[in-house]
Amino acid sequence: MDKKVVTGICSLLVLSACKPAEEHPGKAIWEETCKVCHSVGLAGSPKFGDVKAWSKRIARGKESLYQHALEGWGDMPAKGGNPALSDEQVKLAVDYMVANSSE
């Protein structure tokens, strides 16, 4: 068999065995609710991906972040203004922001 054909077949086998990276379960929630403020820093909210802005918040612990997201904090309303979200969905959105805003 031709060496190029064998190499091509091997490459296809390797690629077919690779699973695509799964999307974070909090991403869709962030995009639908949290992005409005956290993408631009509206009303002093920490911007998504801004490690410096998030570091002091992350240092307080996830339970503090969850509580603030669930109950509201400063200008942020409870559940980011979306009362239809479950507590678990809010926590997933927080986890997504932390994962993308920490070192």
Image (spheres, rainbow, N blue to C red):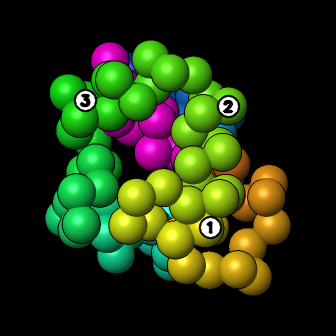
Residue drawn at 67 percent across, 31 percent down = 63
- Please tell me whether mark 2 or mark 3 is closer to you in this view: 2
| Secondary structure of the residue carrying numbered label 3 | helix
Residue named by callout 2: 63
* Residue type (three-letter) at the residue carrying disc 3: Val
Mark 3–mark 1 distance (CA, rounded to whole Å): 22 Å
Q: Identify the amino acid type marked 2.
A: Glu
Q: Is residue 19 above or below residue 85?
A: above
- Occupied quadrant, residue 8: top left
**Mark drawn on residue 79:** 1
Image disc number at residue 15: none
Is residue 12 in view? no
**Nearest the eye: 45 or 74:** 74
Cα gap from disc 1 to disc 2, whole angstroms: 14 Å
| Residue hosting label 3 | 51
Q: Residue at x 29, y 56 (%)?
A: 45
Work out whether residue 38 or residue 78 is closer to the camera in this orientation and state it.
Answer: 78
| Magenta stretch in the rendered image | 94-103
Specify few, some or many for label 3: CA neighbours under 10 Å numbering under 14, 14-19, or 20 or more.
some
Overall secondary structure of the magenta section: helix
Q: How far from the left and from the top, in percent, is residue 34?
A: 45, 67
